[in-house]
Image (tube, grey):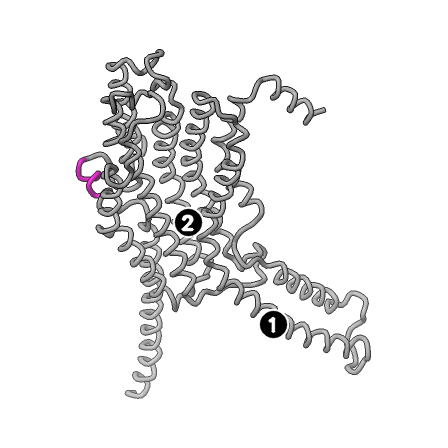
Amino acid sequence: MLRTRQQMSSPDLNSQRSSQLHEVKWSAADETRALIQDFSIVVGGPVYDFLLRIGLLRLGLPNVLRRIAVLVALTWLPLLLFSLIDGVALGSRVKIPLLLDYAMYGRFLLALPLLLLAEVGIDPAIRVAVKAFVDERIVQESDLADFEAVLRRTQRLRDAVLPELLLLLLAFFPIFVFRHEWQQGAVATWHSTAAGLTRAGWWYASVSTPLLRFVIYRWAFRYVVWIALQWRISRLPLHLLPTHPDHAAGLYFLSFPQLRFGVLFCALGCSFAGQILNTVTHEGASLASFKLLMIAFVGIAVMLNLCPLLLWAPKLIKVRRKGLREYAALGNRYTEEFDRKWVHFSVPAAEPLLGTSDIQSMADLANSYAVILDMSIVPISKRLIVQLAIIAGAPLIPVVIAVTPINDVVNTVFKMVA
């Protein structure tokens, strides 16, 4: 009787242990998904906490529209008010009045809002990409702890006080770092005349430009955080398949958040385009003299945008090399058996040749090998490059149209259509 109870209790005990182990595994996966759900490279950091305390932000995704309104009110609106008071907003008192300074529109009414709006597009895309590593089992359950450690290290880097403090110092001390903003310009403008800086010029040099610069610097730091995250993940023992149909071993999903980063370079392009339009309109320069600069800007923007994806090259090179080696060995074994069975009849065939699945299997194997041959060593496609170039160069298109005579535009369009 005692043995029977022991025999009956033993399976129950094993079942209980198995159930507990299963619960532990699921709790680890659930904990990882919970961490991913709250993961962000935007929502966090000393400045974010400060804005949260003063009520400019709400918990969760930052209140972008409110911050845009506040920053425009701090950067561009005082310039307008001071320029109206000093009589340099319009008219012939200075060569470049404020309302005809296209660089100011590009910087504070286009670039600055775009830099803030980028958070709404970039942050969710990064979260989806991080989640894909777990959902698509690229990170195996046995490596979830290491994956969590990478995410937590990334969040600690995002929340570090020293980097943002250094960025603030660089941004708000232009008198030491960017002296040209305090010097008299070559021509009289709304911010600088023969008598020196105007009241609007002082605000521009001490408040407006440092605020814009800090937003740009902070995005540069976030970009470094994003790069560090991808580098650390790439060092984990990932489960990558060289035969994946995306031709990037299953990592092409990383190109989608990278495309969203194109908005940052579009914002910088707005500032660049405004400066070009100023030079052409007010100083009589030709647009052709900026041709190489515009091409260089778009090229550099695309290259900088693709840099994080290049970090995957060492990992994907190994995956491709291993896949070619393994599928070549499999192909040798399969073709040898096929040749022995159907060509030399060393093994009597138990089925007719017509309708056999062996030939289709050989074709499938050949297709798999071809996929590995065509596999990219980086999750980058030609389409992604073209899209990034279009986004970066989009602000330059209105400049070209604005300074090109209408007759030339009509003739060019007619030649392209006819």
Q: Is residue 113 left or right of residue 260?
A: left
Q: Which residues are magenta?
A: 48-54
Amino acid tagged 1: Arg
The amino acid sitting under disc 2 is Val
Residue at x 46% of width, y 61% of height:
138
Query: Residue 142 appears at what percent x and percent y?
Result: 39, 69
Task: Check the image and report above or below for 184 versus 127.
Answer: above
What label does residue 385 carry, if any? none
Image: 202 above or below 29: above
Dot 1 crowding, Cα within 10 Å, few <14, some 14–19, many 20+ = few
User: Camera-side residue: 8 or 356?
Assistant: 356
Residue underneath mark 1: 325
Gap between marks 2 and 1 measured at Cα: 33 Å
Is label 2 or label 1 in front? Answer: 1
Q: Please tell me in which quadrant of the rendered image residue 214 appears.
A: top left
Q: Nearer the viewer, residue 15 or 87?
A: 87
- The quarter holding residue 407 reads top right
Density class for disc 2 (Cα within 10 Å; few <14, some 14-19, many ≥20) is some
Query: Which residue of the protein is positioned furthest toward the left in this rendering?
Result: 53
Vertical position of residue 97 compared to residue 172: above or below: above
The residue that label 2 is drawn on is 128
Q: Is residue 49 magenta?
A: yes
* Residue visible at 63% across and 58% down in the picture: 374
Question: Which comes before the other along the chain, label 2 or label 1?
Answer: 2
Q: Label the magenta part by its dominant secondary structure.
A: helix
